[in-house]
């Protein structure tokens, strides 16, 4: 049987088979979580699903929650869930470990969750705000377009 083991993910790859070890599944990323962290993960996922239509998918080491663009993602880790929430404003809270600007309109807020009891307000409020941000940005009045100046009338 010809093939090889991927150096990064340790998955066996048959000869000639395409392989991308950054492609993963939600189940693979959450398989080894301790019970408290798993319950927190399930609560976050259920909360997000209740917001409405979206796409949930695994990519690399994270599980993405997306509408037109990603509005938050979760990195499952051995001791906690690192939740990265994209908001249009900076939130000052002891729950937020770090804030980074990601674009002109979005800041990512990094929160660590270790137990399902943490998956409630204000964190769930921030997740909803992130989900609704694209709608809010679409309604925001844009820059005024430059109108063509009326031609000056020539004096006769």
Image (cartoon, rainbow, N blue to C red):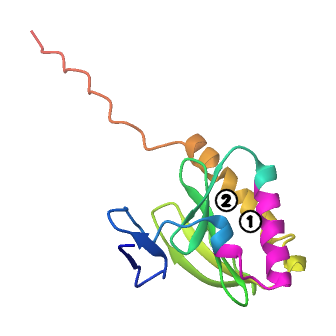
Image height check: is 106 above or below 156?
A: below
The quarter of the rendered structure image containing the N terminus is bottom left
Q: Whole-Å distance between the Cαs marked 2 and 1?
A: 6 Å
What residue sits 37% from the left and 36% below the top? Answer: 145
13 to the left or right of 140: left
Q: Say which mark, if any, is on residue 126.
A: 1
Residue at the location (52% across, 77% down)? 100
Q: Residues within 10 Å of mark 2 (few under 14, many from 20)?
A: many
| Image side of residue 155 versus residue 54, left or right | left
Please identify the residue farthest to the left as the structure is shown: 156
Name, please, the residue furthest toward the bottom: 79
Is 75 in front, or is 149? Answer: 75
> Image point 19% across, 21% down: which residue?
152
Labels 2 and 1 touching (C-beta < 8 A):
yes
Which region shows up in magenta?
A: 29-48
* Relative to 151, 46 lies left or right: right
Numbered marks: total: 2
Residue 87 seen from this side: no
Label 2 sits on residue: 130
Which element type, helix, strand or loop, lies under badge 2?
helix
The x, y position of residue 70, in whole percent, is 56, 58
Q: Quadrant of residue 17?
A: bottom left
Residue 28 location in percent, x, y? 64, 72
Q: Secondary structure at mark 1?
A: helix
Q: Toward the viewer: 146 or 133?
A: 133
Q: Is residue 39 magenta?
A: yes
């Amino acid at each position: 049987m010809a093939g090889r083991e991927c150096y990064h993910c340790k998955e066996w790859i048959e000869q000639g088979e395409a392989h991308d070890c950054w492609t993963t599944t939600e189940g693979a990323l959450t398989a080894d979580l301790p019970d408290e962290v798993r319950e927190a993960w399930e609560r976050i996922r259920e909360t997000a699903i209740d917001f409405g239509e979206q796409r949930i998918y695994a990519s690399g080491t994270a599980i993405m929650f997306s509408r037109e663009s990603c509005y938050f993602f979760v990195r499952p880790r051995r001791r906690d869930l690192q939740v990265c929430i994209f908001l249009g404003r900076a939130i000052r809270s002891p729950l937020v470990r770090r804030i980074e600007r990601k674009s002109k309109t979005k800041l990512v807020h990094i929160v660590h969750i270790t137990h399902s009891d943490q998956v409630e307000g204000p964190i769930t409020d921030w997740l909803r705000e992130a989900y609704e941000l694209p709608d809010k940005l679409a309604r925001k009045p844009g820059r005024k377009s430059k109108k063509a100046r009326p031609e000056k009338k020539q004096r006769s």
